[in-house]
Amino acid sequence: MEINGVEIEDTFAEAFGIQVSRVLVTAATKKLAKIAATEATGYGTSVIGCPAEAGIDCYVPPEETPDGRPGYVIMICNMDKKKLDHELLERVGMCILTAATTAVFDWMEDADEKLTTGKKLKFFGDGYEKQLDIAGRTVFSIPLMSGDFLIEGELGIRSGVAGGNLFIMAENPAAGLLAAEAAVDAIKAVHGTITPFPGGIVASGSKVGSNKYKFLGASTNEKMCVTLKDEVEDSQIPADVNGVYEIVIDGLDEEAVKAAMKAGIEAAVQVPGVLRISAGNFGGNLGAYQIKLQELF
């Protein structure tokens, strides 16, 4: 199968179930909201080594937020509900409460359950906290030096999908990078998804375990390294490919991840020098979801 002359390989992305939170961070200005959202989603590329996978989902204009201020929706994900509860408390408390003029609201539709993040965090007010009603939401006001920090009492979580992915294979690194950036930009328009790696682009695709070092839980995927294609037996890099980038996607559900993958592929194949699109999987042995590339179109 080809799109715009680019081969779409007959393979699938293997994705996994994950617990997802989705919250809205607002502030006095769009810039301040973006800063807080960025801080709260740091160190969140992969649960291989990070305590959560996290990223910014979308911008929400003032006319659509509970407090009439600009905001950004962020998603924080973890395989374990208790760990996700901990990450929400830590990231909101240390990265958003500490940021100027911020407020936090639950932004999860059809939540499986609610976590009491705001009810826990209110105790930072040391007895001076107050309970408010904002647009029908139970919100706690915590006094700070700069004013009051607002947080909704409960934040919803639900079962989502992590690890949707696509590999962009190009004739040179520049073309691959340009296509990867185009793919990430297109995916930003798909609400309910994030691309948790830096700038949305994965430079360091990994494999489970290690061929040489027993203490490693993951190591470089040598079969996908362009600089090793002439050294490694069974390299998966074609002779004409010299630039490879991966995009990893987490979403609220399988349909959101599929939509993001489709949008990313459609953008990437428009870039001259892109030769083929592939995806990463483990033969269907680990993940509950198999998202077949060619069935996206």
Image (cartoon, rainbow, N blue to C red):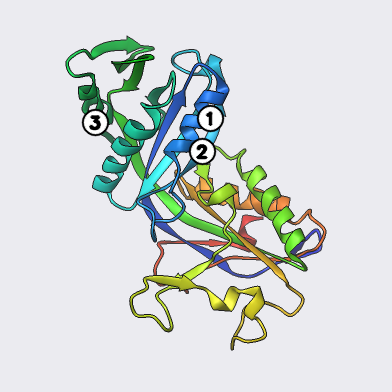
In this view of the protein, can residue 84 be seen by the observer? yes
Task: Name the residue: 27% across, 23% down.
Answer: 153
Residue position marked by numbered label 2 in the rendering: 56
Q: Position of residue 175 (x, y in %)?
A: 76, 59
- Dots 2 and 1: beta carbons under 8 Å? yes
Task: Name the residue: 55% across, 50% down.
Answer: 198
Q: Residues within 10 Å of mark 3 (few under 14, many from 20)?
A: some
Sequence-wise, which precedes: disc 2 or disc 3?
2
Q: Position of residue 62 (x, y in %)?
A: 54, 16
Q: Secondary structure at mark 3?
A: loop
Q: Nearer the viewer, mark 2 or mark 1?
A: 1
Sequence-wise, which precedes: disc 1 or disc 3?
1
Residue position marked by numbered label 3 in the rendering: 116
What is the tally of numbered marks visible in this picture? 3
The image quarter containing residue 229 is bottom right
Q: Nearer the viewer, mark 1 or mark 3?
A: 1
In this view of the protein, can residue 112 be seen by the observer? no
Q: Secondary structure at mark 1?
A: helix
The image quarter containing residue 131 is top left
- Numbered mark located on residue 222 in the image: none
162 to the left or right of 118: right
Compare residues 47 and 128 and report the one nearer the observer.
128
Task: Name the residue: 33% across, 22% down.
Answer: 151
246 to the left or right of 182: left
Q: Amino acid at mark 1?
A: Lys
Residue position marked by numbered label 1 in the rendering: 34
Please state, as top left, top right, bottom left or bottom right, where the C terminus lies in the image.
bottom right
Q: Secondary structure at mark 2?
A: strand
